[in-house]
Image (cartoon, grey):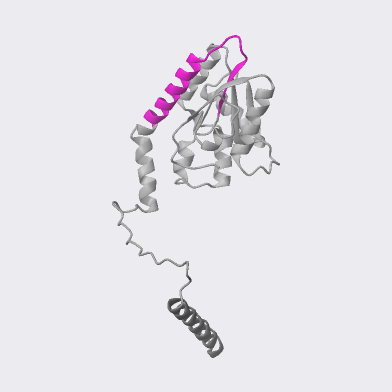
Amino acid sequence: MMTSRRRSIWLLVLLAGLLVASELTAHPHPSAVLTPVAPAEPCAEPVPDLPALKDQLVAYHDSGRYADDLRAVVARARAYLEAHLDPARKQAIVLDVDETSLSNWPEIVGVRFGYERASWNRWVERAEALAIGPTLELYNFAKANGVAVFFITGRREHQRAATARNLAAAGYADWDGLTLKPDDSDVAFAAIYKAAARKRLVEQGYQIVLTLGDQQSDLSGGFADATFKLPNPFYRVP
């Protein structure tokens, strides 16, 4: 219950506000312009609640539309790589890991699109993620044409063995490099860390023909001739 002292303070504040409003109305500032505000347009469609949105994500994945969208982007990436092959140059492509090279769908849907660190770490250690088929095909095409392939992932260094084991089990053989984020790294944004990793490759003499990822942070920051963004409505990594 509000005490008499607090009630008096609130009444004083209210009275002061009324006095200020009255003064502004009686003596408006010369530069003040009163513009009528149009009523907001009603939403054409009701905004779905969170459970409904999650159901829509599952439907998008399970319907085959997600796979079709992945395939379309990778097809453009492959066509670009094929058009820019140059045996005279030290060429490379850069691939992200999660939702680019490997699918974590069982874990994603298992936690209903949330993030639980302990659950995620257990999933990574099991090394059971399957290859994203179109990306694996791009990988094999690059290797068959003498193009180096580097993975740059936001996974941490202590997950290197499990990640390497999972990539190999999924069919990615003989890659040229796997960069993971140092365990003690305090870089807040994946975009900064990944751009720096690509820069090191360029400094080693590589022409990065393209980079492929499911997050904008996989692609931002330069040091690649072309970037290709895979669909991922399931989560965001800045």
Q: Nearer the viewer, residue 145 or 206?
A: 206
Q: Position of residue 41 (x, y in %)?
A: 31, 57
Q: How far across and how far down the image is residue 12, in percent?
A: 52, 85
Q: Nearer the viewer, residue 67 or 128?
A: 67
Q: In the rendered view, would you say 227 is above or below 192?
A: above
Q: Is residue 1 visible?
A: no
Residue 211: which quarter of the image?
top right
Q: Describe residue 1's horizontal placement relative to residue 180 as left or right.
A: left
Residue found 60% across the figure and 9% down from its top: 88
Residue 226 in view (yes/no): yes
Q: Residue furthest right?
A: 184
Of residue 151 and residue 206, the one placed in the foreground of this image is 206
Q: Outermost residue toward the bottom?
A: 4
Query: Which image quarter holds the C terminus?
Result: top right
Indicate left or right for 224 with 20 as reference: right
Q: Position of residue 94 (x, y in %)?
A: 57, 25
Residue at the farthest top position: 88
> Is residue 154 highlighted in magenta?
no
**Where does the magenta region start and end?**
67-95
Give me the residue at 67% from left, 19% from top.
Answer: 205
